[in-house]
Image (cartoon, rainbow, N blue to C red):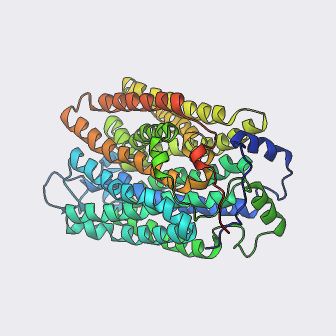
Amino acid sequence: VATMTELSPTAGKNSQDIQGDEKLSPRKAPSICSTRYGIAFIVHLCNFITMAQNIIINITMIAMVNSTNHQPSFNDSTEGLPVNSFGDPNNSPKSLPARAPVYDWNPQIQGIIFSAINYGMILTLAPSGYLAGRVGTKRVVGAALLGSSLLVLFIPLAADFGLVFLIATRILQGMSLGLGYGGQFAIWERWSPPHERSRLCGVSISGILLGTCIAILLGGIISQTLGWPFVFYIFGGFGCICFLLWCVLVYDDPVTHPWINITEKEYIISSLAQQVSSTKQPLPIKAMVRSLSIWSMCVCCFSHQWLINIIIIYAPTYISSVFNIDIRNSGFLSALPFIVAWVICLLGSYLADFLLTKNFRLVTVRKIATVLGNLPSSTFLLVLPYVASNYIIAVSLLTLSCGLGMLCQPGVYINALDIAPRHSSFLMGASRAFAQISAVLAPTVSGFLLSQDPEFGWRNVFSLSFVINTLGLIFYLIFGKADVQDWAKERKLTHL
């Protein structure tokens, strides 16, 4: 993989100084029509399909556990879904798919199935960032997309083989997804001018939200009409198609891109002159471990991911169990928060870059975005069990909680690009690997709480999420920084 030409840094120049210089330089290429935004939209599509493949089991689970037997059964009758879901009892048998297997998995087992994918992600998130910086994002994310798609196609068969096979498949899928989620950020070391960093990352990351929305929305409909196995077949097949597009259209940097406008290429390279360097520099591991700014970023990402995982994993189950709404309506209602979140993520990313052009300090913008993405979201979730009698208010709070939570994307989640741009791919992968621990713990702990206390289980789940989220936010506000750290600055080579 070709790397950018190594450029010497300007001593003592921090992120805010660079940002100020960037405001004075003219933009050489139209924004939305430029190649760098085309790359962002392709990464958006990749995130869309990988996230959909990640969470489709969360909506199909409602159709997979309608049995009271300990052995898999097949819903040849009308027992799979409520009769009044279709308005007419006579229409129920026509709407149900034939021979869709149903299993007896209690909430605790479901929590283990939900969290299994995250065990694999933890193993590959941090190495994927480093690997992408070495061999290129195109190879790493492409392999992740293909691997995840093939494993998703295998999930229905793995479920028939048994719970152990299903969990093993989910772990392997998690390893593939970890490569994709952690490896994608290396591309912005070479493609994103500093003053466009929030919006380019926002456009690409927002694909995760759209993928969540579409998976939840279509997952219920496909489960009812064709059977839940076809949810995995359809999204797995679409992922294979996206893999082909990725291989053709994505390049690791402007230097190797064959169709980029020469003016845009020169503009991107010059705008990154102070931050992009050779990939031969070793990682300052000891300095990273001792850095409170990195630990604050990791802890805050952990606490916020706990909140987001509770919303993503348990929104369909909460709506279905508390309000007794069938899988199709549960799918529509569960998708609504992520539609709003997708819009807020895009708007918030543009707003963050706009504030930087108005002389806001970079650290101020990052912390404002993080506060707005943490505190209101966890508060709304905390209030949710107390308004369970009114599903309109409950869904509204769930929507606001999920939507506002995405304001963290232009905040703490891209902070590594500020404090250590030369090592950001590794740090962003490592911080997400640390945060992914919450994705393992959250469904496991929540499943235990729901099993032990059916009456107050949801209240306990949401209260715990609020406490964890608030503590992580406080830690970040105290120790978070946004200037390039001394250990992250390029050291001049003493030999030729």
- Quadrant for the C terminus in the image: bottom right
Residue 24 horizontal/vertical position (percent): 85, 45
> Which residue occupies the foreground of this view, 261 or 309?
261
Residue 451 horizontal/vertical position (percent): 20, 38
Residue 217 horizontal/vertical position (percent): 47, 52
Numbered marks: total: 0
> Which residue, as the protein is rendered here, is positioned at the far left?
70
Residue 361 horizontal/vertical position (percent): 70, 33
User: At 38% from the left edge and 27% from the top edge, which residue is drawn?
Assistant: 467
> Which residue occupies the foreground of this view, 125 or 77?
125
> Which residue occupies the foreground of this view, 316 or 401?
401
Q: Is residue 295 at all visible to an observer of this figure?
A: yes
- Quadrant for the N terminus in the image: bottom right
* Residue 435, image quadrant: top left
Left or right: 191 with respect to 158? right
Q: Is residue 377 at all visible to an observer of this figure?
A: no
User: At 78% from the left edge and 38% from the top edge, which residue is drawn?
Assistant: 357
User: At 18% from the left edge and 61% from the top edge, which residue is drawn?
Assistant: 72
User: At 72% from the left edge and 70% from the top edge, which residue is drawn?
Assistant: 255
Image height of 94 relative to 396, above or below: below
Image height of 202 relative to 282, above or below: above
> Which residue, as the protein is rendered here, is positioned at the far front?
495
Image height of 255 relative to 53, above or below: below
